[in-house]
Image (cartoon, rainbow, N blue to C red):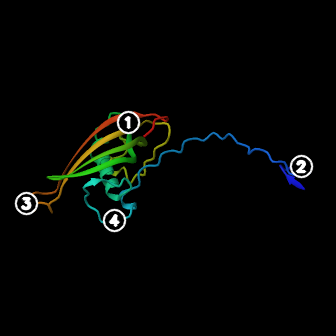
């Protein structure tokens, strides 16, 4: 019996049962992808939600991008803007409107705040790469719609806080 082991050598004779070879491959961590744009996610018709949020939903993406456009990137002190990478958890509570509490993993992008308006960060396709910082943000968003009370106009309030910076070895 002839079994090719490589393109140079052939083994002849009865097959020998060897333990499986374990190849050592250094696996580089995959770069984090930026959270998809709100328009690219399928519309599930959900405009508000009470209880735990689906972190992959369009509502979670809309709330997260709103926080980064209207609050976080307006208050940054360094040059590069933050982009959301993943919604870690979320919860909605009906108060006088809906209060959302989100935990979001974010990273600095390749977009400078001197060149890009914070409200157009989704359209500019800013990307995150492994070198810059990553952090977890706690975000609270309160939304009130005129459908709740026709005499009160639509409004929102966004509060965000940098919870902690994340290194490559941290568990999320």
Classify 12 as above or below 132.
below
Quarter of image, res 160: top left
Tell whether label 4 touches label 3 (CB within 8 Å): no
Sequence-first tag of 1 and 3? 1
State which tag comes first along the sequence, 1 or 4.
Answer: 4
* 1 vs 3, front mark: 3
Q: Which residue is drawn at 14% across and 52% down?
A: 96
Q: Which is in the foreground here, disc 1 or disc 2?
A: 2
Q: Mark 1 or mark 4, which is nearer to you?
A: 4
**Residue holding disc 4:** 44
Spatial CA span between label 2 and label 3: 86 Å
Q: Between tags 2 and 3, which lies in front?
A: 2
Sooner in the amino-acid sequence: mark 4 or mark 2: 2
Residue at numbered disc 1: 79
Is label 4 in a helix, a strand or a loop? loop
Which residue is pictured at 35% across the width and 47% down the height?
89
Please state the horizontal and vertical placement of residue 155, each as a whole percent of the image.
17, 53
Residue most extreme to the left: 151
C-alpha span from label 1 to label 4: 36 Å
Measured in 3D between alpha carbons, the distance from the residue under mark 4 to the one under mark 2, in whole angstroms, is 60 Å
């Amino acid at each position: 019996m002839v079994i090719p082991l490589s393109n140079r050598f052939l083994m002849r004779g009865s097959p020998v049962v060897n333990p499986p070879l374990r190849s050592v491959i250094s696996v580089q961590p995959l770069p984090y992808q930026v959270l998809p744009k709100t328009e690219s996610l399928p519309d599930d018709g959900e405009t508000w939600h009470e209880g735990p949020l689906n972190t992959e939903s369009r509502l979670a993406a809309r709330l997260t991008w709103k926080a980064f456009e209207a609050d976080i990137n307006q208050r940054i002190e360094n040059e590069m803007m933050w982009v959301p990478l993943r919604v870690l958890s979320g919860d909605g509570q009906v108060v006088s409107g809906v209060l959302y509490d989100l935990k979001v993993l974010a990273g600095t992008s390749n977009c400078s705040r001197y060149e890009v308006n914070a409200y157009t960060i989704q359209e500019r396709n800013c990307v995150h790469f492994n070198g810059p910082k990553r952090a977890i943000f706690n975000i609270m968003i309160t939304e009130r719609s005129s459908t709740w009370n026709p005499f009160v106009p639509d409004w929102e309030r966004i509060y965000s806080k940098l919870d902690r910076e994340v290194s490559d070895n941290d568990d999320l």
